[in-house]
Image: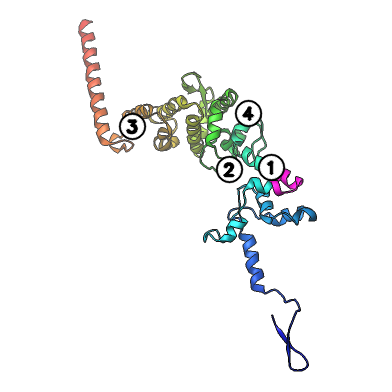
Amino acid sequence: MRSVQVRGGLEAPDKRPREPRRGGVKHRRRSSAGDGRGLRTTATTTAASLTARSTESIPRTSCTVAMTQRGTPRSPWARRGGPRDQRRTISCSAGLKMLPETCRTTGTAILQQSTRRDKLNLQFYLGMTRSVPDGVSIDGFHQDWYKDYDRLESVHSYIQWLFPLQEPGMNRDASILTTEEIEEFLQSNIAKENLLKSYKLMLDFYGIELSDEKTGEVRRACNWRDRFNNLNRRTHNNLRITRILKCLGTLGYRHYQAPLVHFFLKETLVHRELPQVRDSVLHYFVFAVLDKRERRRLLKFAYLSYDRREEFVWCPKKIQIKWSQGMSSRTELLHCEDGRQEEED
């Protein structure tokens, strides 16, 4: 407290209020802005929305908890473990109870929205929400986008909704598939039927049709020449097919993976109709198959169908030698059987 000179040579304390130091103000501003590491800075707007009567008795951290989606905020002293952090840290439920009715309702709604957002993929396949940013429902895709090849080719934001994965994609508006969603998806017949329709939609786009829904066998469609030409020109569809294969293995159609990969192996290595897809088939399609036995059979078929086997690098050399010996023994057996038939004739 400062002193002032008065008459008689005595000093008296100066009781005038002192201006706050700028350093302290800046420090407090940094503290309020940093309270939430990873949280949205909505404490200011939240405090403004509360009435004057309610804000007098409600700590600022309570509003922050109610209006954000990520739990309890942390202060800059959290790393040090100081007592200030303990005073400022309150539970989300306790914070909501201390809020007025309007703020508590809003906070509860936002927390419920956070829970719902974790299941956006399931809600989309149940017809409860639409894709973003296209704004199309699952039925809309199956009805309006079927055989609309120009739109299926040019739009790149729908594939993450039709075939969600547990990894991020190019569409930031799409939601990552969660473990809870997978469990509920596998128990929902409606969701699985809609996924099957989405699979048929994309097969038709690639010039393929599903010949057996039980086994997952596929074959060429009537429009296969035109669609194969599109596959050779637009190689970004290889990424889409990889996503489709992974999604099938995750959401209940694991037995559909190997037949589709086998189809592409035949078209690339045997018939040689899809030269621009061959590398993706060997590098990605085959290894997206979850069943190890089926994957081994696919690699064996690829090796025996490969034109330059000495350059085949997708399995160990020991296995390649074993496959080659087995093929030579079968070839000798076939020649012997043919010779016996000629002698009998």
Location of mark 1 (residue): 108
The answer to whether 77 is drawn above or below residue 322 in the figure is: below
Mark nearer the N terminus (3 vs 2): 2
Location of mark 3 (residue): 306
Mark 1 burial class by Cα count in 10 Å: few <14, some 14-19, many 20+:
some
The answer to which image quadrant residue 154 occupies is top right
User: Which amino acid does the dot numbered 3 rest on?
Assistant: Tyr
Q: Residue at x 53, y 32 (%)?
A: 182
Mark nearer the N terminus (1 vs 4): 1
On the image, the x and y values in percent for residue 301 come to: 34, 27
Q: Does the image show residue 205?
A: no
Q: Nearer the viewer, mark 2 or mark 4?
A: 4
Location of mark 2 (residue): 171
Location of mark 4 (residue): 126
Q: Residue at x 68, y 49 (%)?
A: 67
Q: Residue at x 56, y 29 (%)?
A: 184
